[in-house]
Image (cartoon, helix red, strand yellow):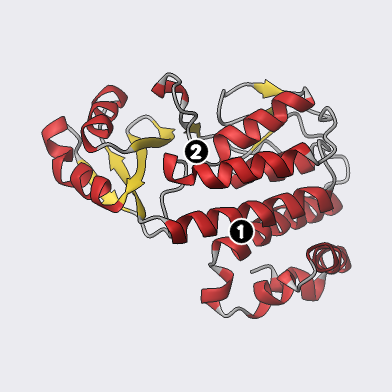
């Protein structure tokens, strides 16, 4: 993962060295040499994805020095990368945040029995009804006709078994380590909130569209709230239609 960039680009190599120093271990070695089971751990893959994304942006800017981004966005972890690209926080602060986020989520996965499922070909209203019946959460609104549920293994199994009864064409259990973007991640969300409170956040240099509210955010307090809420768990007691992370792509 990114090994060719690290070997061939001084810019990528410098960023990898910077990341290793900030984290206190060699994430670049894990990216380059694995083993795969180490790289795919939530605590490792999140900082690796963040570093990889910002390496890509740096190399694009070297090729296209006149490039002027007009907005940024990213799904889940990618929203941290988008904020780093827009200058909301430093490369190192963002890296440490996502590393801690990965640790918190990995611990939550180990403490719970969670799963996720992608539902294809159903209307949002039908899928929300199914989620309520199975006692799981609507996790991601990826696109019309593709929505992801997240929750306990038992709940997801019920949702998959009953999907056709709710008019959903296909339900696919996902190969993930736990119930991301669900109430089972609440412990991780609480810990992340404390980490976010200690990070210096500035107004981004370009619009960053957040997942949770699907709107641009620029105020430091609002950025913290959006990164906390959309990253991990739905907020108890709120309208369930606002619990979901919404799909967005980076506009670089």
Q: Quadrant of residue 130?
A: top left
Name the quadrant of the N terminus.
bottom right
Question: Which residue does the image show at 73% across and 55% down from the upper left?
Answer: 56
Residue 27: x and y in percent read 72, 70
Q: Quadrant of the C terminus?
A: top right
Reading the image, the residue beneath label 2 is 233
| Count of marks, rendered view | 2
Residue 109 horizontal/vertical position (percent): 46, 57
Quick check: marks 1 and 2 in contact, CB under 8 Å?
Answer: no
Most foreground residue, 109 or 74? 109
Q: Is residue 184 left or right of residue 217?
A: left
Crowding at mark 1 (Cα within 10 Å: few <14, some 14-19, many 20+)? some
Tell me the residue that label 1 is attached to. 103
Pick whichever, 4 or 182, lies toward us.
Answer: 182
**Helix, strand or loop for disc 2:** loop
Q: Is residue 127 above or below residue 48?
A: above
User: Which x, y percent locates residue 101?
Assistant: 63, 51
Q: Position of residue 75 (x, y in %)?
A: 56, 41
The residue drawn where x is 76% and y is 23% is 218
Q: Residue at x 57, y 42 (%)?
A: 189
């Amino acid at each position: 993962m990114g090994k060719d960039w690290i070997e061939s680009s001084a810019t990528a190599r410098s960023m990898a060295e910077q990341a290793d120093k900030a984290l206190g271990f060699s994430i670049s070695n894990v990216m380059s040499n694995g083993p795969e089971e180490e790289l795919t751990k939530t605590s490792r893959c999140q900082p690796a994805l963040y570093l990889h994304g910002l390496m890509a942006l740096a190399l694009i800017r070297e090729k296209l020095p006149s490039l002027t981004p007009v907005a940024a966005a990213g799904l889940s972890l990618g929203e941290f990368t988008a904020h780093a690209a827009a200058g909301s926080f430093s490369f190192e602060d963002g890296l440490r945040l996502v590393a801690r986020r990965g640790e918190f989520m990995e611990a939550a996965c180990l403490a719970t029995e969670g799963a996720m499922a992608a539902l294809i070909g159903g209307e949002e209203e039908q899928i929300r009804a199914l989620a309520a019946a199975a006692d799981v959460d609507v996790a991601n609104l990826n696109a019309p006709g593709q929505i992801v549920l997240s929750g306990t293994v038992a709940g997801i199994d019920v949702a998959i078994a009953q999907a056709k009864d709710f008019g959903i064409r296909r339900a696919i259990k996902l190969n993930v380590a736990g119930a991301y973007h669900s109430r089972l991640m609440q412990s991780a969300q609480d810990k992340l909130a404390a980490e976010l409170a200690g990070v210096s956040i500035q107004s981004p240099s370009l619009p960053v569209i957040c997942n949770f509210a699907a709107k641009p955010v620029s105020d430091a307090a609002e950025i913290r709230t959006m990164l906390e809420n959309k990253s991990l768990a739905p907020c108890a007691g709120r309208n369930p239609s606002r619990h979901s992370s919404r799909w967005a792509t980076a506009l670089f």
